[in-house]
Amino acid sequence: MAKLSFFIYSEAIQSVPPMQPPKPVITGPLMVLTPIRIPGNYSFAISFGILGFNITQSNKLQIVFSDPNGVSIQDTGVVELPADQGQGNLPPEYQGLVLNMDYRNVLFRNEGDYKTTVFLNGEDIGGSVIPVIASEKQ
C-alpha cells in the first residue's frame, strides 16, 4: 500500500548541477507560511516521497492544496506518471519516488490551517497541514 515517507514545506527547492542525476536541495524549511498581509500572495515549495506502490506500471497522481474550510485553492488535476524500470535490488515496498513542486503567488484569503493532500490512483495517501499567518498585522 502506498504511503508518504516524508513531506516538507520550504522556501524553495533547487537542483544542484553538476551532480548526475541532479540532486534537489531544499532551502529554508518552513513550519508556518507567513505572507505579509492576509489577503495576500505567497510563494513556497513542497517536497515529498511516496513508497510502496508499483512503479513498473503507470500511476495517476493528484495534489490538492486546500484552505481552512476545505476548499481547494490549487489542484494539479490528475497527472499520469509513466512506468519506470524499477530501482535495482530494492524490494518493491521500498521503491518509490520523490517529487518537488513550486507554488508561486498563491492567494491566501484567510489565516488558518491549510492542507496539502496527495492522491495516488485516486486514493488519499496522506498529506500535511501548515498554518498560514500574516507577518504584519494591519
Image (tube, helix red, strand yellow):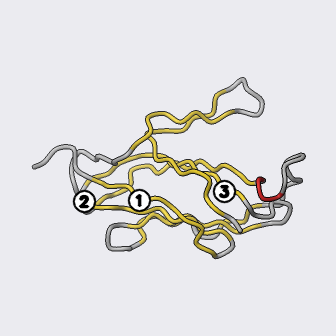
Q: Would you say 132 lies left or right of 91 here?
A: left
The front one of 110 and 7 is 7
* The N terminus, quarter of image: bottom right
- Residue 32, position as x, y percentages in the image: 33, 48
The residue singled out by tag 2 in the image is 111
- Residue 117, position as x, y percentages in the image: 51, 65
The residue singled out by tag 3 in the image is 50
- To which quarter of the image does residue 3 belong? bottom right
- Residue 103, position as x, y percentages in the image: 47, 51
Q: Distance between the residues labelled 3 and 1?
A: 17 Å
Q: Callout 3 environment at 10 Å: few (<14), some (14 to 19), or many (20+)?
A: many
The front one of 95 and 109 is 95
> Please, what is the three-letter code of the amino acid marked with disc 3?
Ile
Q: Would you say 6 lies left or right of 60 here?
A: left
Mark 1 lies on a secondary structure that is strand
Query: Disc 3 or 1, which lies upstream in sequence?
Result: 3
Query: Disc 2 or 1, which lies upstream in sequence?
Result: 2
- Residue 121, position as x, y percentages in the image: 69, 73
Mark 2 lies on a secondary structure that is loop
Query: Could you tell me which residue is drawn at 72 percent across and 23 percent down?
Result: 18
The residue singled out by tag 1 in the image is 129
- Residue at the left extreme of this rendering: 138
Q: Would you say 120 lies left or right of 11 here?
A: right
